[in-house]
């Protein structure tokens, strides 16, 4: 097949706007799968994804489509995750496409995630085809949605396709539009292999499977290829495509999308976004424009039971097999013992990793206050360092200035919640850039906010302020000099490392007070009085005390009370054992995570 | 070597005139029809056990004194064992009559435990008690006239609205009776009681930990000064008048319990009877065992359980005796624990024994949990 008949595309959609349903209809209509085989929603696999309605792993699917013009086209549907944190995955999926469907729910209108993803797609110069879905719903408002697409996203929507993924209406039009509007892959300049690794997935039997988009040349089984970034050679043991099940083929040609298998044991051996070329006759330039995205949120991850450090290490290794975006390195803490500093793409990514560790591996973990990456400019020179851990902050005397990352946040919400959203953002040092009216009821607000302010419960706040109707997304803006200080929590005069955080000075006092009040609530009384202090620099900004334990006794203990009492003491002992010891002080594990949600 | 003492015998009489607000013991309001069947069933239950000789007898409940004379007689005649050193019966002022005291005397009861709970009528009302201070006074002096020379008075402290001064007043008034034994229980909030519901509904607040601790220390001070031995967390006695029966619980020795909801511990096995009279009668009257469940804690568990219990007592524990009794080396396991608790002034060494300090008593759960082996 000539590359003129290939169309590579993604679907950009807000959660629940119908992406999976549409994909299912497309697969059905093109007989890629039979109706019978479609277990509801072919593209989402993992339970967790299903629960949260997000796709974590992008699966490329090859579809043969006989168009009305009589020709057969090869369509490659490259799935994208729906959530903010996975911008990097969206970004690499988009990097392998020439076009994207922008799918909007006719009854809901444009949501924030679509905004951010459309911005990304435009960066890759993709052809964007607006599709308005769920037109079968009685409250579908096609005209208003068209206006929003034009006003907010600056995309002409006059001939947007109207579909009902549920009934199948309009789905064929979508396919025709893909064929007519999305450009075929560009003609290769050379005949040498040049392919982009846009994802990888770990398979117990096969090792790491790489998803690739071939831009130039071709890739075959048995070929020796070079990963240009890593400078590592591989022998290709299998080449294949997904339809939607993995099916091996002889060759992937220029413009095609598929997978390759080589002898790769862990995801960390591969850099997503790397270029693959022929080891014998390599190209000189890698695939242009792919953004390498780094973790943005870091947190200490410790086993609840210190004896389980090795288990935690195994679990993280297993994770890394599949998730190259998770970074981790050993770290230790006086309070928490041995653990890892983990880097996540965002808060959701962090929550997902945490949940999976606990749920799938049954391991209890403690996570410390997440931190963004700060840029510290050192005195007496040009040098600056990036720090992702408050404990690595250099001595104050050596610091010229500290910069913190800012993000642009889009919030789409009912007009009636403007006030509360403004309040939330102002409380978080946000600056309102603009407010646009979407329709008679909804607006989109754009803010500039320090990233540090949104990594904890910002999303939840937006959701509750809008009674669930609001949506948000963000994109990285830039680093800006800021008045950042290290907030420390001292227990009986000694700082507890795991509680340290970097905060904006204007927030230090409130935050410090919140943390020690929370600690006071959660810490057990000890035999002695405990002083809690919050400091920034050497200045105490808040203090409180936990009184000594005065009475802890069961008044009556006769026949039947004995067993009950023993159980009570056993529980008490169990609780004591689970607490973390800092000198003579016992701190319940809950305290380390509870301080995350201080208000 | 001294031979193993006989077990104690406990009989749970599950009847009261009226249920008190805070009480979680199993008892029902007096039902004349059932008392006869109950006494009969206890008789049967006792004869189903192999143990025939007892060192102590404690008839409790509930309120044993609410049984009428005939029932009392048949109950006591079945469970009194001549070899018993201590024979206690619990009584409440409202049902302690001349006639009943006479029966107690006739059957050899040598210790009475009377529920006063408070010397203030307003407090008695708050607790849901049906007697008055005056009722108690009358019952107490009547008992003395009958010649009972070993009487315990039960008091409750640590409920809402109580102050240190108010409590002192209670103690002083109690001391006027010059009882041989005083039990002072800090009111616990027991699940499912009306009192518990009031607390949950916010109608009653819980006494602060500091005040409760203050009351505990004040009690110790006043009663110790008055010559009582503070021999267990909630119990004070004239020297030599410590409750032999209750000591069996705290020393983790053997006892047999009869009646619904009673517990037994014999030969390393602990078992408990069905919780209601209904079920109890249903089983026993059909010649079936009223046992509901049992446990045989492993040796290690019994070991630390015995330590935890022993540390409720001023006499504390004897590490060598425990090591011998359980075949576990006490010092090997607990050297650091004991050292730490001594440094924290919670325990002291007294010759070969380890005893709780007053602070160690009021923090008994904390101290005990340090000995739990898990
Ligand atoms: N009425 C109606 N419901 C739809 C349509 N498309 C999808 N849905 C429903 O919308 C919900 C979300 O769809 P899904 O495909 O899971 O959305 P995704 O999160 O974007 O993948 C599901 O309950 C679908 O059944 C449509 O065209 N009409
Ligand atoms: S406290 Fe005593 S008298 Fe009151 S209900 Fe309970 S057992 Fe009966």
Image (cartoon, coloured by chain):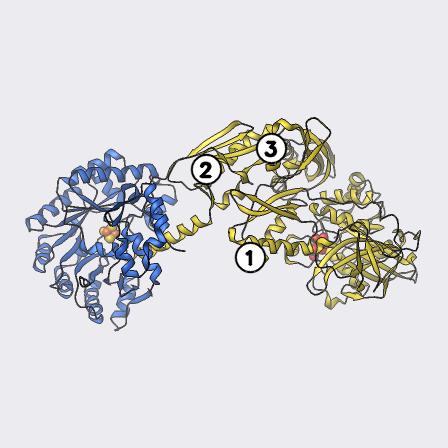
**Residue A497 x %, y %:** 54, 38
* Residue where numbered disc 2 is placed: A520
**Residue B275 x %, y %:** 30, 61
Residues indicated by labels 1 and 3 sit on the same polypeptide chain: yes
The answer to whether the residues at label 2 and label 3 have Cβ atoms under 8 Å apart is: no
Mark 3 Cα shell of 10 Å, populated few (<14), some (14-19), many (≥20) = many
Q: Is residue A568 visible?
A: no
Q: Quick check: B281 left or right of A267?
A: left
Q: Mark 3, chain letter? A: A
Q: Nearer the viewer, residue A129 or A173?
A: A129
Ligand 1 quadrant in view: bottom right
Q: Mark 1, chain letter? A: A
Mark 2 Cα shell of 10 Å, populated few (<14), some (14-19), many (≥20) = some
Quadrant in the picture for the C terminus of chain B? bottom left
Q: Nearer the viewer, residue A412 or A536?
A: A536
* Residue where numbered disc 1 is placed: A362
Q: Secondary structure at mark 1?
A: loop
* Residue where numbered disc 3 is placed: A503
Which badge, 1 or 2, is on the more N-terminal residue? 1
Q: Colour of chain A?
A: yellow
Q: Mark 2, chain letter? A: A
**Residue B174 x %, y %:** 16, 41
Q: How many marks?
A: 3
Residue A593: image quadrant is top right
**Residue B11 x %, y %:** 21, 61
Q: CA distance from mark 1 to mark 2?
A: 30 Å
Q: CA distance from mark 1 to mark 3?
A: 33 Å
**Which chain does the blue colour mark?**
B
Q: Quick check: A350 left or right of B289?
A: right
Which badge, 1 or 3, is on the more N-terminal residue? 1
The answer to whether the residues at label 1 and label 3 have Cβ atoms under 8 Å apart is: no
């Amino acid at each position: 097949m000539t590359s003129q008949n290939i169309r590579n595309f993604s679907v950009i959609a807000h959660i629940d706007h119908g992406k999976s349903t549409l994909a299912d209809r497309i697969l059905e209509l093109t007989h890629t799968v039979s109706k019978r085989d479609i277990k509801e929603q072919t593209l989402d696999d993992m339970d967790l994804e299903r629960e949260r309605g997000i796709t974590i792993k992008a699966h490329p699917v090859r579809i043969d489509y006989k168009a009305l013009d009589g020709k057969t086209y090869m369509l490659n549907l490259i799935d994208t995750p729906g959530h903010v944190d996975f911008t990097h995955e969206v970004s690499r999926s988009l990097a392998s496409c020439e076009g994207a469907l922008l799918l909007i729910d006719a009854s809901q209108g444009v949501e924030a995630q679509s905004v951010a993803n459309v911005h990304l797609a435009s960066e890759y110069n993709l052809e964007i085809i607006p599709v308005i879905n769920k037109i079968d719903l009685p409250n579908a408002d096609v005209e208003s949605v068209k206006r929003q697409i034009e006003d907010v996203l600056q995309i002409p929507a006059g001939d947007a396709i109207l579909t009902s993924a549920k009934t199948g209406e309009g789905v064929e039009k979508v396919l025709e539009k893909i064929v007519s509007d999305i450009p075929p892959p560009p003609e290769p300049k050379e005949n040498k292999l040049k392919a982009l690794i846009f994802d990888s997935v770990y398979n117990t039997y096969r090792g790491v499977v790489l998803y690739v988009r071939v831009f130039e040349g071709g890739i075959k089984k048995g070929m020796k290829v070079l990963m240009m970034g890593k400078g590592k050679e591989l022998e290709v043991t299998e080449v294949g495509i997904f339809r939607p099940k993995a099916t091996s083929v002889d060759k992937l040609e220029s413009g095609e999308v598929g997978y390759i298998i080589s002898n790769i044991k862990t995801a960390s051996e591969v850099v997503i976004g790397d270029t693959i070329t022929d080891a014998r006759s390599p190209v000189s330039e890698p695939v242009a424009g792919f953004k390498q995205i780094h973790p943005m949120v870091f947190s200490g991850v410790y086993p609840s039971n210190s004896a389980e450090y090795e288990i935690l290490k195994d679990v993280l290794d297993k994770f890394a097999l599949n998730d190259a975006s998770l970074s981790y390195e050993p770290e230790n803490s006086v309070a928490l013992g041995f653990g890892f500093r983990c880097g996540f793409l965002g808060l959701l990514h962090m929550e997902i990793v945490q949940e999976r560790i606990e749920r799938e591996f049954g391991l209890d973990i403690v996570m410390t206050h997440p931190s963004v990456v700060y840029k510290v400019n050192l005195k007496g020179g040009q040098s600056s360092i990036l720090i992702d851990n408050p404990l690595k902050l250099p001595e104050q005397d050596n610091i010229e200035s500290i910069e913190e990352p800012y993000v642009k946040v889009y919030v789409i919400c009912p007009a009636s919640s403007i006030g509360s959203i403004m309040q939330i953002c102002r409380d978080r040092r946000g600056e309102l850039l603009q407010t646009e009216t979407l329709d008679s009821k909804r607006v989109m607000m754009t803010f500039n906010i320090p990233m540090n302010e949104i990594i904890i419960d910002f999303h939840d706040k937006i959701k509750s302020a809008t009674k669930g109707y609001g949506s948000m997304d963000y994109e990285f803006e830039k680093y800006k000099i800021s008045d950042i200080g290290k907030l420390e929590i001292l227990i009986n005069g000694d700082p507890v490392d795991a509680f340290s955080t970097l905060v904006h000075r204007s927030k230090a006092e409130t935050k410090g007070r919140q943390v020690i009040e929370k600690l006071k609530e959660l810490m057990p009384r000890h035999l002695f009085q405990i002083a809690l202090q919050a400091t920034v620099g050497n200045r105490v900004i808040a203090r409180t005390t936990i009184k000594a334990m005065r009475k802890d006794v069961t008044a009556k203990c006769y026949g039947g009370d004995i067993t009950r009492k023993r159980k009570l003491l056993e529980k008490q002992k169990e609780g004591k054992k689970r607490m973390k010891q800092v000198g003579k002080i016992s701190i319940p594990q809950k305290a380390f995570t509870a301080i995350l949600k201080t208000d | 070597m001294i031979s193993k003492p006989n077990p104690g015998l406990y009989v749970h009489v599950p009847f009261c005139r009226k249920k008190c607000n805070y009480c979680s013991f199993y008892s029902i309001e007096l039902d004349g029809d059932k008392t006869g069947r109950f006494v009969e069933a206890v008789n049967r239950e006792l004869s189903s056990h192999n143990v025939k000789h007892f060192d102590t007898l404690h008839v409790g409940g509930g309120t044993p004194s609410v049984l009428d004379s005939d029932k009392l007689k048949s109950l006591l005649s079945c469970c009194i064992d001549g070899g018993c050193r201590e024979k206690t019966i619990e009584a409440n002022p409202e049902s302690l009559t001349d006639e009943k005291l006479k029966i107690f005397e006739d059957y050899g009861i040598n210790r009475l435990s009377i529920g006063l709970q408070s010397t203030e009528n307003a407090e008695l009302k708050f607790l849901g008690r049906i007697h008055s201070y005056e009722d108690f006074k009358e019952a107490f002096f009547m008992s003395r006239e009958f010649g009972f020379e070993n009487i315990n008075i039960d008091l409750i402290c640590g409920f809402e609205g109580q102050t240190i001064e108010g409590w002192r007043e209670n103690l002083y008034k109690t001391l006027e009776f010059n009882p041989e034994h005083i039990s002072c229980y800090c009111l616990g909030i027991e699940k499912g009681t009306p009192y518990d519901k009031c607390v949950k509904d916010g109608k009653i607040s819980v006494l602060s930990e500091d005040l409760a601790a203050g009351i505990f220390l004040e009690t110790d001070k006043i009663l110790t000064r008055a010559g009582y031995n503070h021999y267990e967390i909630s119990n004070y006695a004239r020297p030599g008048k410590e409750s032999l029966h209750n000591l069996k619980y705290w020393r983790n020795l053997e006892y047999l319990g009869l009646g619904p909801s009673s517990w037994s511990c014999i030969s390393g096995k602990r078992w408990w009877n069905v919780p209601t009279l209904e079920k109890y009668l249903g089983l026993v009257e059909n010649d079936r065992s009223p046992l509901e469940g049992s446990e045989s804690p492993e040796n290690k568990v019994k070991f630390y359980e015995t330590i935890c219990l022993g540390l409720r007592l001023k006499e504390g524990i004897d590490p060598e005796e425990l090591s011998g009794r359980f075949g576990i080396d006490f010092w090997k396991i607990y050297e650091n624990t004991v050292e730490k608790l001594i440094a924290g002034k919670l325990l002291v060494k007294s010759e070969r024994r380890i005893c709780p300090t007053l602070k160690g008593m009021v923090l008994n759960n904390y101290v005990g949990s340090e000995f739990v082996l898990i």
